[in-house]
Amino acid sequence: MHVEYIRFTVDSAAPDAFIRTWTQAQALLARSPLIESIEVDQQDERRNEFVVRIEWTTDQGRGQYRKLPEFQEFLGIVRGFDAVSMDLYAPVLKAVGAGRKETRS
């Protein structure tokens, strides 16, 4: 598994549009067997900053997805929001805290 972090800073009037767009994009991405999970997080104080976290099933998942016809559909959905950065990470450590009650969706 590899984890991709994509950072966005959107126009201060556009956070709601960004969330609507990524709700649609998330539904498309979630259908891919190359993806384990997708999470979109909004910064608490600067509400126009977001991080999208995608867990790929393999280190090659992102590259494989970009070759599929669905990738063009995905680009059509998210077009208009430019990423500040896109980085791929290999997980090193992970722990589940005692306070975790259920899986986040």
Image: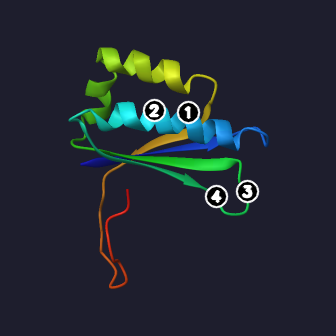
Nearest to N terminus: mark 2 or mark 3: 2
Residue 73 at x, y percent in the picture:
42, 18
The furthest residue to the bottom: 98
Q: Is residue 84 above or below residue 75?
A: below
Q: Are marks 3 and 4 in contact (CB under 8 Å)?
A: yes
Q: Which mark is residue 46?
A: 3
Nearest to N terminus: mark 3 or mark 1: 1
Residue 56's quadrant in the figure?
top left
Q: Is residue 76 above or below residue 17?
A: above
Q: Are marks 1 and 2 in contact (CB under 8 Å)?
A: yes
Q: Are marks 2 and 3 in contact (CB under 8 Å)?
A: no
Nearest to N terminus: mark 4 or mark 1: 1
Q: Residue at x 30, y 68 (%)?
A: 93
Q: Which mark is residue 91?
A: none
Residue on which disc 1 sits? 21
Residue 12 at x, y percent in the picture:
79, 43
Three-letter amino acid code of the residue under disc 4: Gln
- The residue nearer to you, when weighing 69 against 16, is 16
Residue on which disc 2 sits? 25
Q: Quick one: label 3, few (<14), some, or many (20+) residues within 10 Å?
A: few
Q: Residue at x 49, y 39 (%)?
A: 23
Query: What separation in Å lies between label 4 and label 1 (alpha carbons)?
Result: 17 Å
Three-letter amino acid code of the residue under disc 3: Arg
Residue 54's quadrant in the figure?
top left
Residue 83 at x, y percent in the picture:
59, 35
Q: Which mark is residue 43?
A: 4
Q: Looking at the figure, which quarter contains the C terminus?
A: bottom left
Three-letter amino acid code of the residue under disc 2: Ala
